[in-house]
Amino acid sequence: MTILYLSLFSFIGLILLVVHSYFKRGFRLTLSFFLFSFVVGMRKEAGTFLGPSLSNMRHPTPFIHTTNYPLLFSVLNTTIGWMLVFYLSWCIAEKIIERSTYLKGKIFPTLLFAGMVIAALSYAIEATAINIGWWKWVFFDVHLAGYLVGGVHLFALSAWFYFAVHFLAPYFLIECSPFRQASWKCIFFLIPFSRTCTMLFLGSDLPRMVHEFIIFFILMILVLVNPLHFNYPNFKERLTDRSLVCRLVDIIPYIVASIILTMLIFIDIIKIKNPYLLISLFPLVVLILLSLQKVPVRLIAFLALGIGLAFGKFGIAVCIPVLIFLGLNAFFNLRHATKI
C-alpha cells in the first residue's frame, strides 16, 4: 500500500468527518475548526519537512522519506492527517466522557481524553510507519522505550499529545466555551505560543519537558476543580425528525476509526509481516470501546487488565486510559457523596 493510497483514504475520512461536524456542530464551528486545524497543520509540517530554520531549535525531528513525491504533496498529505486526527479525537473523547455524569459536556475532561486518543493514534501509526520505512527518527529516546513495541519513542507519543492539547485548548476556549463572547479571548493563543517560546529561547530538552509537565499538571487541576462546560449550539436537534440520518451521522467517527485500524492491521500483517506490531493498536481499541455506551466499563476494565497480564510491560499503555477514567469517576462520585 503506497502513500498515495493512504492519502486517498485520509481524504475520504476527512470529508466524512467534515460532514459529521456540519450536522452535529453547525457551519460556523465546522469552518473555524477545520480552517484553524489546516493552518496549524501546515505550519507544523512545513517546519518538519523543511527543517528547523533556527539553529538553536534543537528539538528532534523525524526524517521523512519524500523522494517519490513533491514536497507540497507531502506537506498537504500530513496536514490532512492532522485535521483528521484532531477532529476524530474530539469525537471519541466526547463519547467517552458521556459515560460520566460529572464529566459529560465539559471542556477540560474532553481535552484530556482527546490528548490520550491522539497519543494512542500516534502509537499505532508510529509503530507501522517506522517499521515500513515511511520515516525514521534521527535520535533515540530511551525514556520508557522498553514499554512500547516497534521501536516507538515516548517522545513521539508525548509530541502528539501536547500538539493536540495546544491546538484544542485555545480552540475550545475561544469557540466553544463561555469565553467565546469575551473581547479578550484571543489571549488563549498564548497557550501554544508558550511552548514554542520555551523551545526557542530555553531549549528543547529539559525546559520543554518542564513546560509539558506544568501544562499537564494545570490540565489535571482544571479537570478536577473547574472542568468548564461547553457552550455552543448543538445542531443535532435539527435531525430529530430524521432519526436514520441522525444515527448515520453519529457513526461516522467510528467508520473513520475503522478505516484507520483496517489499514494499519493490513500493513502490519500483510506488508510488514509482523503481527507483534498489533499490540500498538490495543490502546486505541480500548479507547474506542470506552466511547461505546453499550459496552460496559467493567468489561473494558477486565479486558485492559487481561491485556496487561498477557503482555506484561507492553500492556501498561492499554491500562492507563481506563485507570484515568475510573479514577476521575471515583473522585467525582466520592466528592458528590461527601457533599450530601
Image: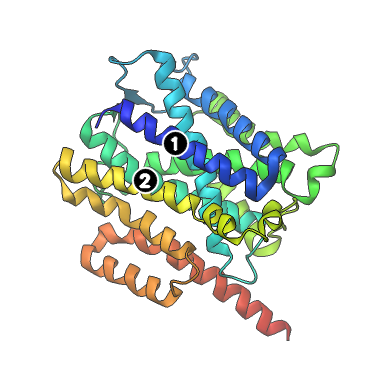
Label 1 and label 2: CA atoms lie apart by 10 Å
Disc 1 crowd, CA 10 A, few/some/many (<14, 14-19, 20+): some
* Residue, disc 2: 259
User: Residue 166 at what x, y percent from top left?
Assistant: 58, 39
**Is 223 or 46 nearer to us in this picture?**
46
Whether residue 1 is visible, yes or no, is: yes
* Residue, disc 1: 12
The residue drawn where x is 40% and y is 21% is 74
Residue 46 located left or right of residue 178 = left
Q: In the picture shown, does residue 200 fall above or below 285?
A: above
The residue drawn where x is 48% and y is 28% is 79
Residue 121 located left or right of residue 281 = right
Q: In the picture shown, does residue 275 fall above or below 98?
A: above
Work out which quarter of the rendered image holds the C terminus and state it.
Answer: bottom right
Residue 282 located left or right of residue 201 = left
Disc 2 crowd, CA 10 A, few/some/many (<14, 14-19, 20+): some
User: Residue 163 at what x, y percent from top left?
Assistant: 52, 38
Element marked by disc 1: helix
Quadrant hosting residue 63: top left
